[in-house]
Amino acid sequence: MTAQLIDGNALSRTLRAEVATRAAALKARGVAPGLAVVLVGENPASQVYVRNKVKACEDNGLHSVLEKYPAELSEAELLARVEALNKDPAIHGILVQLPLPAHIDAQKVIEAIAPAKDVDGFHVASAGALMTGMPGFWPCTPYGCMKMFESIGYELRGKHAVVIGRSNIVGKPMALMLLAKNATVTICHSATQDLGAITRQADVVVAAVGKRNVLTADMVKPGAVVIDVGMNRNDEGKLCGDVDFAGVREVAGWITPVPGGVGPMTITMLLVNTIEAAERAAEAT
Ligand code: GUN
């Protein structure tokens, strides 16, 4: 059996069109939804990510402000900028691109963002809201994975979902989102013994480690749904995920490609969170 592809580009187009419609409706009410993106330093990957986020906003009717600062910016100066953006009524979402330079405490900066504007979903208040089922913002990458399950009409209730990776940005929130849908969830990580024995029992595998070939065909139950969050380069310098795509697609029932899978969904969900933040702010006034 060859797996069916879950096309992140196509799903993104649909979801972004919905964002554009909601943005137009807000604008008609006199509210221009706005995202502030803050970049400190010259990290080349961050520069690309930030450019793509700003462009995605512009393409879908959101207003965006890009604030670029030199790597020498002090933590106090950055905190002051976040504070000013918290108070700015034209800004509904704030994203501080990570990683930050080493002299800045990233968690302290994240905690300075008003939870109502935390469209990355990294604030402890957002993490707590996800954990307890309260309204809040979900981190964009695992949220995008949930939209992918929804797009294929996959019923997670009662299924065994295995998440490989335990980061605060993907693995842990992913596990909580799957649990909220009544899946039985296992989190695997670098100290897990016999990963394959666990993944072979999985109806769903989400690989979010940042290492090539973490999941190979012999580790996958026939028909499983495989979501690949990885973004790596192979020996030829080509983008690849954490999953051995060529092998696993012959065993899985559904699989996300890299590129064109989870990647575009992350920015899409940032747009969704930002329009949601703007709508909530408009309701509150
Ligand atoms: N760096 C890599 N991915 C992300 C992300 O989703 N948000 C932020 N703020 N920084 C990142």
Image: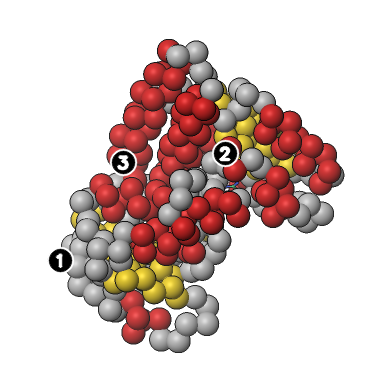
What amino acid type is highlighted by mark number 2? Ala
What amino acid type is highlighted by mark number 1? Met
Q: Residue furthest bottom?
A: 193
Q: Residue at the location (52% across, 27% down)?
A: 284
Spatial separation of the CA atoms under disc 1 and disc 3:
24 Å
Q: Earlier in the sequence, mark 2 or mark 1?
A: 1
Name the residue carrying label 2.
Answer: 116
Q: Could you tell me residue 91's position as x and y percent?
A: 61, 27
Q: Could you tell me residue 60's position as x and y percent?
A: 43, 26
Residue 163 - label:
none
Q: Residues within 10 Å of mark 2 (few under 14, many from 20)?
A: many
Q: Earlier in the sequence, mark 1 or mark 3?
A: 1
Spatial separation of the CA atoms under disc 3 and disc 2:
26 Å
Is residue 45 found left or right of 277 in the rendered image?
right
Residue 15: image quadrant is top left
Q: Earlier in the sequence, mark 3 or mark 2?
A: 3
Residue 50: image quadrant is top right
Q: Is residue 256 above or below residue 89?
A: below
Name the residue carrying label 3.
Answer: 11
Name the residue carrying label 1.
Answer: 1
Res 32 visible: yes
Res 140 visible: no
**Between marks 3 and 2 in the image, the one whose residue lies nearer the viewer:** 2
Q: Residue at the location (41% across, 86% down)?
A: 194
Residue 107: image quadrant is bottom right
Is the CB of mark 3 within 8 Å of ligand 1? no
Dot 2 falls on a residue whose secondary structure is helix
